[in-house]
Amino acid sequence: MTARAIIALDVPTLDEALRLVETLGDSCRFYKVGSQLFTAAGPDAVRRLRAAGCDVFLDLKVHDIPNTARGAVRSAAALGARLVTVHASGGQPMLEAAVRGAEEGGTGSTPCDVMAVTVLTSIDAGGLATSWGRDPLSVRDEVLRLAAMARAARVPGVVCGGSEAAAVRAAHGSALSILVPGIRLAEGGGAGARMDDQARVVTPREAAAAGADYLVLGRAVTGAPDPRVAMQAVLAELAGP
Ligand code: C5P
């Protein structure tokens, strides 16, 4: 399967988001609404994207007690979100509750898949060790541990860095779908490209080759001088030999 590119609408207003959607036109029909836009524009952001015929990844990264997580995911699914994120570190009972919420709120025509965030792509091994109060950790091992817990909770997919995607694919085959953020275009420097606040980045082609089903791109496209040109570069990389 070809990986699908999702563009992150990390902008402060719905007007700005809809302008980007119009700019990209048919080249992108899958958008991420995250905490910035959702906090500013609320459920309307999702409704307007759905009305424009786009799929929506609602990246709320829920991390709460199971009952609250279940309700949040149920609401996201009822709104028409195709994907919604929860933090795997919320624990197996929370993940199981989130999956129930997605089943309760989703419809036959718009099923909603819970995606469990393993380790944020802005975190490296040192940052992970500091946050979790443990000795230096392997990010890859932590991602695999959390992905196994997500699968045990019947979560359909996980979010991880491109550098861990191949290991997740090898361990779980098609039992888990994989979403990879932290993407930077090869054109313009590859590893030398702007990292911004990300610690673990890969190119679109590397993510797809590692087995990603979905790629989330933010600033590499939305912050480009011409987002249309950047989007075409992403699609060309994904279609390339
Ligand atoms: O601008 P950039 O491409 O770095 O943005 C990446 C997007 O992916 C952001 O919207 C961010 O919230 C999201 N994301 C991430 N790491 C995760 C999950 C989501 O960077 N683990």
Image (tube, grey):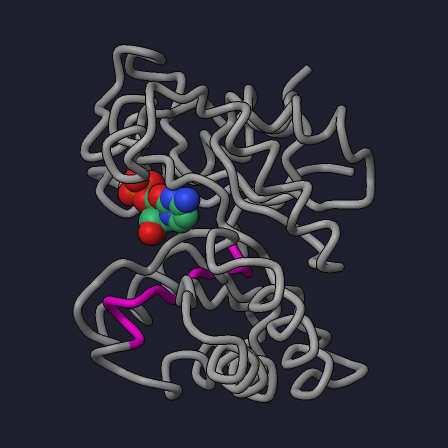
What residue is rendered at 21% in x and 79% in y? 40
Task: Report the quarter where the C terminus lies.
Answer: top right
Give the magenta part as a residue range.
28-38
Residue 16 at x, y percent in the picture = 22, 68
Q: Which of 160/210 is in front?
A: 160
Q: Position of residue 178 (x, y in %)?
A: 63, 42
Please name the residue shown 48% across and 82% down the image.
Answer: 72
Q: Where is residue 30 shown, x and y percent of the image?
A: 53, 59
Q: Is residue 111 above or below residue 147?
A: below
Q: Which residue is pictured at 19% across the width and 74% down the height?
A: 13
- Picture quarter containing residue 141? top right
Q: Quadrant of residue 186?
A: top left
Asked whether residue 227 is in view, the answer is no
When asked about the image quadrant of residue 92, the answer is bottom right
Question: In the picture shown, does residue 112 fall above or below 207?
Answer: below
Question: Residue 149, how many percent across, how many down?
Answer: 65, 47
Q: Is residue 189 magenta?
A: no
Q: Is residue 7 depicted above or below 61 in this figure?
A: above
| Camera sees residue 46 | yes
- Side of 69 where 39 appears, left or right: left
The quadrant of the picture occupied by the N terminus is top right
* Residue at x 67%, y 71% (from the top left corner): 99
- 233 or 158, which is in the foreground? 158
